[in-house]
Image (cartoon, rainbow, N blue to C red):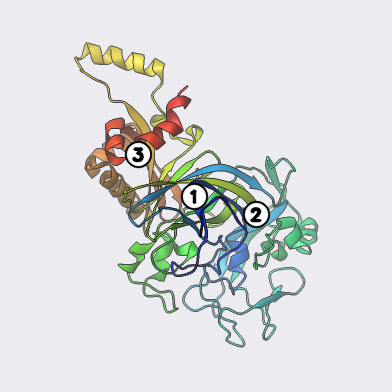
Amino acid sequence: MNAKQTVLVNEFTNGILDPEKEMMGPVKDGGFIIANTAPGCWGPMITPCIRGGHEVTKPVYVEGAEVGDAIVISIKSIRVTSAATASGNDSPVEGRFVGDPFVAVKCPECGTLYPETRIEGVGPESIRCANCGADVTPFVFTNGYTIAFDENSQVGVTLPKEAAEQIARDGHSYMATPDNSVQNPVVTFAPHDLVGTVARMRPFLGQLGTTPSRPLPDSHNAGDFGQFLLDAPHEYGVTKEELKDKTDGHMDINRVREGAVLICPVKVQGGGVYLGDMHAMQGNGEIAGHTADVSGIVTLEVKVIKGLNIDGPILLPVQEDLPYLAKPITSKEKEAALTVANKWNVQKLEESLPVSFVGTGANLNEATENGLQRAADVLGITVPEVMNRATITGSIEIGRHPGVVTVTFLAPVEYLDRAGLSEIVRNQYLNRVE
């Protein structure tokens, strides 16, 4: 099949990223992917036929991408299409799943695994097994809210009971769920514990990446949530060694937003770029476990880097999102540094640019160790050197609690040259130094 300059995506997986499944595309190296994404988290979580905890787009095959390469994904635009959504803390309901409520839901009455459902009314007991009529939702809210957005996507306001129930009765419309989405809209539950709270909107993608080299539930394609798959009793259980086939596409890093660049590993032929789980806003850590999931339209540009054999994503945030110490050195700062260098006989100042390595693990300590090691491996230096650079020219930031971080620092351009990254990093930052 001839590769296309632009691939339009409006189809979704059943929650499983499977390298054996046919991909969409192919898209040209240097081409574009435009996708109408479905809400992640809560909607799929209360839709048992979705087996991964999220509902992400079908992966797209990128022309020329081979195992051991990397794909540079530039986020050209993100636009929220939902008028409202709902979210909050969750609590799993015992007896309604096999090992993992995100992956293997079971009807508590008829025992059907991955049951089809229907919606009856509104409220937390409205999702019913299509086979026997039992309340089948595997999660309930411990504290939840319904939030509506202004027309310009600037702010959201949490709603009282009556307004939440009005939205619940027409959930698909208010959430603008894509035509091919099968999820139950989470606003159906009409949560309303927070009322009148104002939140700024800054949309980003909680899921963006490439296809793992073994079938994995999409929300578990990460080093922290992937721990739930270790020796799990359902069909998607893996060993610790097999979990290394993940690509860490589920990051929930709020810096993966419009204008950012994400460099992703290629672990299957064609890469298989997928996306979803758009969030209207989220503070570092996603400490509630969930945030305001929305539908949206996303435009990505994809380019292949040959032979950049990375284990996990490398992020180039927009300059505004960089830690203060990791922002590119300005001309004025360089002048001051030259004065110090001349005084102390420093022959040459490093030329450096920001780079951010994603690390994941069972907890934040493991995630930090993973990010440090990935940085050292890609740049061909030692972990202690990375630690020093991240301390005085960067920062460790939480993407998601319990185990996603970014290790960000100013890397010498000679290191980036050696790794084959300098051109893409220069394009992101060099002409944007204030």
CA separation, marks 3 and 1? 21 Å
Res 308 seen here? yes
Q: Mark 3 or mark 2, which is nearer the start of the sequence?
A: 2
Q: Residues within 10 Å of mark 3 (few under 14, many from 20)?
A: some
Location of residue 134 in the rendering, given as x and y in whole percent from the top left corner: 67, 82
The residue to which callout 2 is attached is: 295
Image quadrant assignment for residue 202: top right
Type of amino acid at the residue the image marks with label 3: Leu
Location of residue 76 in the rendering, given as x and y in whole percent from the top left corner: 56, 41
Image quadrant assignment for residue 346: top left
CA separation, marks 2 and 3? 33 Å
The residue to which callout 3 is attached is: 421
Q: Residues within 10 Å of mark 1 (few under 14, many from 20)?
A: many
Q: Mark 1 or mark 3, which is nearer the start of the sequence?
A: 1
Query: Residue at horizontal 44%, vertical 78%?
Result: 235
CA separation, marks 2 and 1? 26 Å
Does residue 331 lie above or below 235 as drawn?
above
Secondary element under disc 2, as helix, strand or loop, is loop
Q: Tally the marks.
A: 3
Q: Residues within 10 Å of mark 2 (few under 14, many from 20)?
A: many
Q: Do callouts 2 and 3 mark residues in contact (Cβ within 8 Å)? A: no
Q: Mark 1 or mark 2, which is nearer the start of the sequence?
A: 1
Q: Is 198 placed left or right of 226 in the picture?
A: right
Residue 28: give its label.
Answer: 1
